[in-house]
Amino acid sequence: MSKLCILIDNGHGIETKGKRSPDGRLLEWKWNREAAILFSKKLDEIGISNVLLVPEEKDVSLSNRCLRANTITKNMKKNGVDTLFISIHVNAGPYGGWSNASGVSVYVYEDGSEKSKTCGKIFTRKAKEMKLTGNRSVPCDEYWSCRFYVCKNTTCPAILLENKFMTNKGDVEYLLSNEGKEELINWWVSSILEYVKTYSYNG
């Protein structure tokens, strides 16, 4: 068993306003939860421990998400296990309605730890290899710097993933397909395995 536990934060809840494709077919809270469960099962299969931070459908505040993550991190540390926080989301264009923005993005807190930044770079490189970045330019740092609450206020390394755009018709079709979900989860898992290898979590 790896000496690493993945803390899976499926963003938003059923009460969150908006957060859906213009045609209403993709509900972000629902997609995030379905993908998180599949991700968890895949990690179980390859022997990497993980926790679904928000199993309930209702909204859970950002502070409570961080509290859950930090409590688990503290307890895991006592047993010599490190944690990695991954927040799962779907992106959206800035003006409402459909847009041509597409692809995945990886976010790291601007003053985040070295492990957070390394993780962000690994995820971005894997996304580029798998041709998942769409039409978005990749920053020089190989991740997008952010001040997102959950990335700032977790005590363990943390990244936030925006998995394509719910405001792009092609991306929506992809996200709703079994093939799309499978490819994205393969991206997450292959990136985790590279992170595990980088920090010798398998001993």
Image: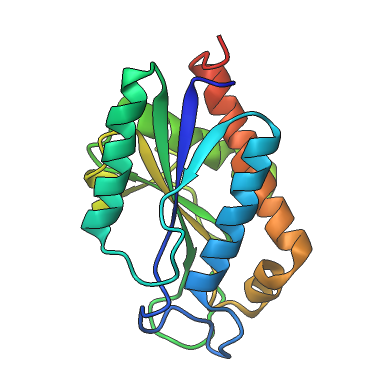
The quarter of the picture where residue 94 lies is bottom left
Q: Residue furthest top?
A: 203
Image quarter where the C terminus lies is top right
Seen at 52% across and 63% down, the residue is 32
Q: Nearer the viewer, residue 68 or 32?
A: 68
Observer able to see residue 131 = yes
Left or right of 189? Residue 108 is left
| Residue 145 position in % (x across, y down) | 32, 47
Residues 73 and 126: in front is 73
The reply to whether residue 140 is visible in this rendering is no
Q: Is residue 181 above or below residue 50?
A: below
Q: Is residue 104 above or below residue 156?
A: below
Rendered residue at 25%/55% (across/down): 64
Q: Is residue 191 above or below residue 92?
A: above
46 left or right of 19?
right
Q: What residue occupies the far right of the structure in this picture? A: 179
- Compared with 69, 183 (above or below) is below
From the viewer's side, name the closer residue of 153 and 106.
153
Q: Which quadrant, please, contains the N terminus?
A: top right
Colour scheme: rainbow
Q: Position of residue 52 (x, y in %)?
A: 47, 49
Q: Residue at x 25, y 35 (%)?
A: 155
Q: Which residue shows up at 46% across the image and 73% down it?
A: 92
Q: How many marks?
A: 0
Residue 143 appears left or right of 27 = left
Q: At which x and y percent is residue 111?
A: 22, 37
